Image: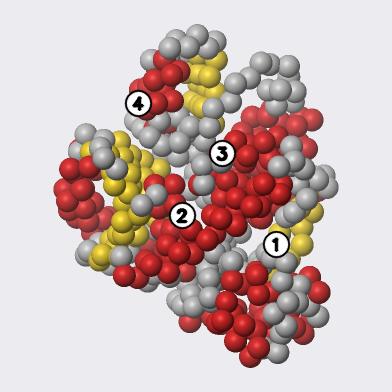
Amino acid sequence: MLKREGYDVFATLMRNPFTKGFDRLMTEENPLVIFSDMGSGQLDSIERLKGSSIILDHHQPGTTAPSSKVVQVNTNLCGIDGNYAACGSTLAYRFATLVNPANIDLVGLAVAGAIGDRQHMGGFQGINQEIIQQALKSSQITETTKIKLQGRTLRDALVWSIDPYFIGLSGNQDAVDQFLHSLDLADDARVEALSHDQLVRLQSALALHLLKAGVAPEVLDLLISPRYHSQLFPVDLEYVADILDACGKSGFRGVGFSLCLDGRRSWSEAESIEHSYKEKVLTALHDLSRTMTELKGLRYFISTDSSLGGVIAGIAAMYACPQDKALFAITRTDSELHISCRGNRALVDRGLDLGAAMRQVGSELGGHGGGHKIAAGATIACDKEPEFLQKTDALLNRQVKP
């Protein structure tokens, strides 16, 4: 939108913790800085910048009101649930179409972002649903219902599947071959070439596999659900979300950003990045059972990569762990602990609020934290790990009702 309006723009893809990014911003003479998908949790730092700022955020805001030089647009302050009903990309899309209605052609980016934030689970809600319905009506996107398997062959699709993650199949070629043989399906068949009967057989067997693993109902719905297509990209938007996530978590944020600006470029490079990313994720998921520690109110494991820690926690919390506790990933560095935590909707309904917990415990231990009720994070000093686990365990036990 800014490029189309003729503005000179410098885009920075910041990652948590945001200290280094703000240190650089403090030295610059920017007349305006727009914080997209962040900002409400960093209001104190933003207030110290020299120019004006706009915050477009859906994470839980603090209690401090901004000064006159900061415009804060936060869905939660407007009575819109930022956990499920709106996300960073749909809020950015609303802003773009408010400036110029012609920007409706960018709706594919908004939908991909909402899917990437898991806000399609159980069906789109709120602003997300409004945007989807408007885009379908105007033919900016199209909808088809199909199984979520991405790969050149059935074997590739199942072996490299991390979302859904099929315990015992994902990452295990021999087990996949036996599974397909039991269904009388060729391992080198393409998903698109399956007959209706073959597809029903495959879908039923995979759904049963997930049910036996004890996944939540809304997770099971993801296996066969609407997929959306936009002229911006050569593949469906759920796969776009997966590719962008892989680029971001693998340290290739620039490649993902270039895809967003031009969805027909950098595609082969992005798919290569995704393949390497899936290898790392599958290895970590296979090792998880022997590295996880259980406390009364949470489970946690130690991750060697802060970017992947949250990914592993999110996948494991949905597909590989019991649904009774939140799962925490802790990454140790020389000076800091980076924590990512994931829950589920059933726990949120019982009182779980990971965003509030991370904000409170992080602050009490001299660090910082925040996020959503269902997914959050924190950064604290490395010597605070035992205290962090003790405080967080006690707090979550108080939050979650029997």
Rendered residue at 43%/12% (across/down): 27
Residue marked by disc 4 = 64
Amino acid type, callout 3 = Arg
Please tell me how crowded label 3 is: few (under 14), some (14-19), or many (20+) other residues with Cα within 10 Å.
some
Pointer 1 local density, CA inside 10 Å: few below 14, some 14–19, many at least 20: some
List the residue tagged with mark 1. 226
Give the residue pinned by disc 2.
311
From the viewer's side, name the closer residue of 328 and 58: 328
Disc 1 is placed on an element classified as strand
- Residues at marks 1 and 3, CA–CA distance in whole angstroms: 27 Å
x then y, percent, for residue 339: 33, 47
Identify which amino acid the numbered label 1 is placed on.
Pro
Of circles 4 and 3, the one toward us is: 3
The crowding category of the residue bearing disc 4, from other C-alpha atoms within 10 Å (few below 14, some 14 to 19, many at least 20), is few
Question: Residue 150 at what x, y percent from top left?
Answer: 68, 64
Which circle marks residue 253 in the picture?
3
Secondary element at tag 2: helix
Could you tell me how far apart the alpha carbons at marks 4 and 2 are, in whole angstroms? 31 Å
Residue 103 visible at all? yes
Asked whether the beta carbons under mark 1 and mark 3 sit within 8 Å of each other, the answer is: no
Q: Quadrant of the C terminus?
A: bottom left
Report the number of numbered marks.
4
